[in-house]
Amino acid sequence: IDERTRFNDLGSEVAGWLLADEEDMKNSPGSDSANCTGGGGYGVMESRNAAAPNDGKARYANYGKDVYFRSNAAQAACYINAFQQLQSIDMYWMTDPNERAKFEYGFPSSYGLTVARGRTLDAMNGTLKPQWNFVETGWPWTESAAQGGRRILPAEARAAVWQSIIAGARGIIYFDHWFGPSGSGCDSSKSVIRGECPISEDTRQALAATNAQVKAVAPALNGPHVIT
């Protein structure tokens, strides 16, 4: 939303507005988590909401580690519940060298836990909104392999997508930035999804096939829930 005025030809192709990305990691929560006010990150989200056009289009925000595990439930629930109509939390469990000590590290099923965290926080106010999830496509950290950095592998990426959907994710976003070693033909200017990173071509193909699978079963995923 902070880049909206850069463009003078926005039209019907715009489906919604990104209010902010990882605002929870840039500012502390506001001082009043009972009312989701009191400055800090809450204040930023309030101002981004005020800057968005009153056009009825979806308002989306992505959050990070503070919402997932650093903030308490009341603080995190404000971010999820008070400012947007759909949201995600980005936790890159297969590749984040900073979280190797956490039990979630290294398991595609942990992407489902990320969705579950968002859904739990979302339910705290008695209403539910769509929860999306992020899956990395390449090497999203600057740390080398010796420092614990790595790229996500094809089967891992595919499993992360499906674990997210199984846990209730209503949308998948791919984090397509490559911050790892550039000697492999990839660097920060290259895209895995567009086939510009030879070392991750196998992951690109796996995700293309995964996308096709998701599209094929979309009628069922978007259909009525069965309660037994």
Image (cartoon, helix red, strand yellow):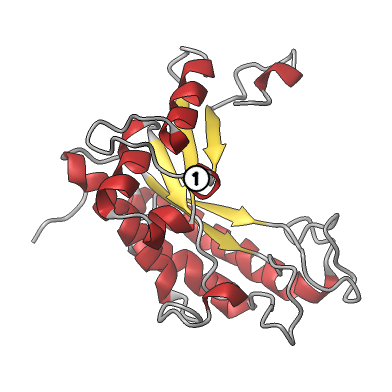
Q: Position of residue 181 (x, y in %)?
A: 83, 74
Q: Is residue 140 left or right of residue 47?
A: right
Q: Secondary structure at mark 1?
A: strand
Q: Position of residue 87 (x, y in %)?
A: 42, 43
Q: Position of residue 127 (x, y in %)?
A: 20, 38
* x 68%, y 26%: residue: 3
Is the N terminus in the top left, top right, bottom left or bottom right quadrant? top right
Q: Is residue 70 left or right of residue 190?
A: left
In this view, the residue in front, 116 or 159, is: 116
Q: Residue furthest left?
A: 228
In this view, the residue in front, 201 or 64, is: 64
Is the C terminus in the top left, top right, bottom left or bottom right quadrant? bottom left
* x 69%, y 78%: residue: 149
Q: Which residue is mark 1?
A: 62
Against 74, is 199 above or below?
Answer: below
**Quarter where residue 21 is shown:** top right
Q: Position of residue 14 (x, y in %)?
A: 59, 25
> Residue type at mark 1?
Asn
**Crowding near pointer 1: few (<14 within 10 Å), some, many (20+)?**
many
In this view, the residue in front, 168 or 35, is: 35
Q: Is residue 111 left or right of residue 72?
A: right
Against 5, is 32 above or below?
Answer: below
User: How many circles with numbers are drawn on the protein?
Assistant: 1
- Mark yes or no: residue 136 visible: yes
In this view, the residue in front, 28 or 73, is: 28
Q: Residue furthest bottom?
A: 146
- Mark yes or no: residue 223 visible: no
**Quarter where residue 167 is shown:** bottom left
* x 87%, y 76%: residue: 184
* x 31%, y 46%: residue: 75
